[in-house]
């Protein structure tokens, strides 16, 4: 069962465990089509056609086209956790009238187990978070390829009404993808202008690497993603959404107050950084909600997420 970080067995949380079990109780949902954006097996995008008609009066002049939601899955950028675990959420959005693109990307490989930061201890292997620069290469390439792929395989989608959403590590990637135009000028992923988006809805995102690192979110995943502590400060300006502000793109964060995987403080820190940069970021805090209900079609929180997306898309 996928998880973004190992739990401390000394501090069991029955509610969190139940939420996680519910989120991952849904069988994967096969897409309507899959397209490739590169040669690597992970460089693919799954497409879900809208399962219902566009609501009356919602798409005047859009010729029955549906807004496009681009989904980026979480899992701490680690290899065991691929896009399949978020397919029930993608299908949930499709059943609410959205066209959906579910993006896969390269994640971290297995490395020798570590103890005290030194490889070779423990006698086994463990998944590392992300690959530098491959993870970022893939997300940039996927978004660059997406317009042509959507025109080809998902003609029901109205790309003029595109919203990016992502959960946890995928929430980080959603914020990063929307901020490519404010990357440092020497960044290979930088674009000349903002992406033509209606907005971003980031779900429990790993949105501020400084706070996430201090809290050791997902077992220190942000440090691993950037190649370890020696490279962290050097690479952070190219990867940390909290340093890529303002974007000028409408952004909403949705966060459970009881989230013990990516705590509320991470989202709050990003929102504060945005405010200091002169940008207003919406922050929807859900009472008595943990990490996983945001992508669980059986949870009320998931309906809140869909409504936040609709507010931007329609």
Image: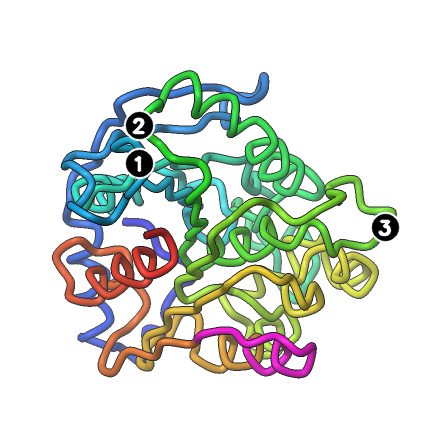
Q: Residue at x 68, y 62 (%)?
A: 117
User: Where is mark 3, residue-wise?
Assistant: 185
Please determine whether, in this image, residue 304 is positioned above or below residue 194.
Answer: below
Q: Which residues are magenta?
A: 271-282
Q: Mark 3, residues whose alpha carbon is within 10 Å: few (<14), some, or many (≥20)?
A: few
User: Are the residues tagged 2 and 1 within 8 Å (C-beta)?
Assistant: yes
State which mark lies toward you, 2 or 3: 2
Q: Please tell me whether residue 32 is drawn above or below residue 181 in the rendered image.
A: above
Pointer 2 or 1: first along the chain: 1
Measure how far apart labels 2 and 3 are at the Cα level: 36 Å
On residue 156, which mark appears?
2
Q: Looking at the picture, tell me which residue is in the foreground, 180 or 20.
A: 180
Identify the residue at image location x=87%, y=47%: 186
Q: Secondary structure at mark 1?
A: strand
Say the numbered circle drawn on residue 99: 1
Closer to the eye: label 1 or 3: 1
Category of crowding for the residue at label 1, using alpha-carbon neighbours closer than 10 angstroms: few (below 14), some (14–19), many (at least 20): many
């Amino acid at each position: 069962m996928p998880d973004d970080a190992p739990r401390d067995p000394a501090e069991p949380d029955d509610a969190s465990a139940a939420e996680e079990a519910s989120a991952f109780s849904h069988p994967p949902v096969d897409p309507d089509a899959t397209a490739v954006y590169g040669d690597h097996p992970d460089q693919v995008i799954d497409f879900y056609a809208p399962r219902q008609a566009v609501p009356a009066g919602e798409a005047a002049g859009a010729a029955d086209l549906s807004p496009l939601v681009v989904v980026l899955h979480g899992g701490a950028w680690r290899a065991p956790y691929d896009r399949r675990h978020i397919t029930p959420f993608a299908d949930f959005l499709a059943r609410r009238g959205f066209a959906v693109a579910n993006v896969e990307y390269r994640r971290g490989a297995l490395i020798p187990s570590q103890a005290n930061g030194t490889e070779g201890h423990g006698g086994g292997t463990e998944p590392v978070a992300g690959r530098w620069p491959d993870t970022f290469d893939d997300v940039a390439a996927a978004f660059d390829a997406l317009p042509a792929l959507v025109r080809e395989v998902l003609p029901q989608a109205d790309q003029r009404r595109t919203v990016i959403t992502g959960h946890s590590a995928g929430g980080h990637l959603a914020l990063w993808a929307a901020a490519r135009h404010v990357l440092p000028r020497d960044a290979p992923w930088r674009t000349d202008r903002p992406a033509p988006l209606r907005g971003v809805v980031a779900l429990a995102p790993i949105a501020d690497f400084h706070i996430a690192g201090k809290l050791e979110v997902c077992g220190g995943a942000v440090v691993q993603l950037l190649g370890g502590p020696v490279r962290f400060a050097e690479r952070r300006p190219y990867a940390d959404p909290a340093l890529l502000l303002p974007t000028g793109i409408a952004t909403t964060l949705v966060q459970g107050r009881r989230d013990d995987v990516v705590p509320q403080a991470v989202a709050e820190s990003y929102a504060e950084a945005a405010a200091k940069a002169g940008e207003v970021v919406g922050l929807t805090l859900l009472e008595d909600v943990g990490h996983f209900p945001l992508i669980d079609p059986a949870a009320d929180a998931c309906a809140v997420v869909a409504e936040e997306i609709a507010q931007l898309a329609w």
